[in-house]
Amino acid sequence: MAPPASACAGAAVHRFVDPQRAAYGPPVETSGTGTGPIGAQAAADRQHEDEIRVERWGEVPYAEALDRQLALHACRVAGHAPDTLVLVAHPPTFTLGRRAPEADIVLDAPALARRGIAVARSDRGGRATYHGPGQVVLYPIVSIDELGLGVKDWVCLLESALIDTLADYGIAGERRPGTAGIWTKAGSESGPAAKIASLGLRISRGVSYHGVALNTGLDASVFDCIVTCGVAGERVTTIAAERAASVSDEDAAARLAGHVAARLRDARQSRAGSCATSATKRRP
């Protein structure tokens, strides 16, 4: 049963303004008190941009966040909510995709308890990963059917936004064939190539949920406790490690949301993702 429209009212609506079209910046707040640390750009430009709802949930336990995603997903499917970008942080948690083996978590239950790390089974794709402080998580609750995107192009759009965000910090990110996520390039500040962002999605009734996690300043050694995304010995890094300087999670979150929104806007115009080919484009 579809939820009533009254149950789908959003907490905050923002518009994303890209006056130069050359560099996608952080989101611009257009509701509430206004000008906060995520900045403000020309008000005259706002009326020309598509509205995309942004919800900032703060730190939320993984299971609770999943329940809230599912409620928002139902609202989007029913047409009672717009495409929504959720920015959230989780307390230390290892998550397992719906088909991931329990053996992907190397630590036993007592060791997990000593470290204060929870374990959650998820309905997303992919294997094991970690969420915790020092990481920006973005869950786009987006109708890819309305965008006319296939799954591959949707994944590529999100990866492109991650690469855009890393470029803001002077970090070159790259994809790897056959797997989702973003890696630094070999020879960067902290050494060999390493994974810096993960991606795991589920698409139901044409609407995507779950999303991406960008490592900003966490202790990457925690990934030694799992078979990261199904790859034993995967090296993991952060923006702070690559820059040899700290980074604000709030700034990184704003930039990532801005880049995803800009890519969504482009996709609405072209009805194709960032890596679209004639074989992957979908038309109405």
Image (cartoon, rainbow, N blue to C red):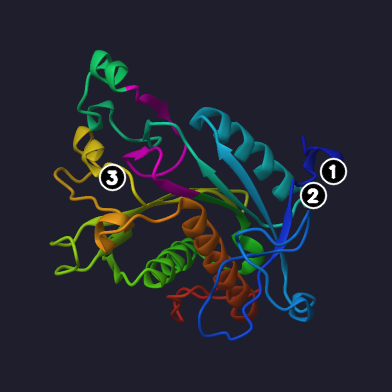
* Looking at the image, residue 48 lies above or below residue 236: below
| Circle on res. 5 | 1
Q: Position of residue 146 (x, y in %)?
A: 67, 64
* Residue type, numbered disc 3: Cys
Judge whether residue 180 can be spotted in this image: no
Which residue is pictured at 77% across the width and 52% down the height?
79
Helix, strand or loop at mark 3: loop
Q: What residue type is labelled 2?
A: His
Range shown magenta: 116-137
Residue position marked by numbered label 3 in the rendering: 229
In the image, 270 versus 31, the foreground residue is 31
**Which of the pair 173/241 is nearer the observer?**
241
Tell me what residue is drawn at x 25 percent, y 55 percent: 241
Mark pair 2, 1: CA separation = 5 Å
Please give the residue where the numbered disc 2 appears in the rendered image: 80
Q: Secondary structure under badge 1? A: helix
* Number of residues whose C-alpha sits closer than 10 Å to that of mark 3, classed few (under 14), some (14–19) or many (20 or more): many
Mark 1 closeness class: few <14, some 14–19, many ≥20 residues within 10 Å: few
| 136 is within the stretch colored magenta | yes
Nearest to N terminus: mark 2 or mark 1:
1
Q: Say if 120 sits above or below 45 in the image.
A: above
Identify the amino acid type marked 1.
Answer: Ala
Rendering coords of residue 210 (x, y %): 51, 46
Q: Position of residue 127 (x, y in %)?
A: 32, 40
At numbered mark 2, what does the secondary structure look like: helix, strand or loop? Answer: loop
The image quarter in which residue 28 lies: bottom right
Nearer to us in this view, 102 or 33: 33
- Quadrant of the rendering where the C terminus is positioned: bottom right
Q: Are marks 2 and 1 in contact (CB under 8 Å)?
A: yes
Q: How far, Cα to Cα, is label 1 from label 3? A: 37 Å
- The quadrant in which the N terminus is found is top right
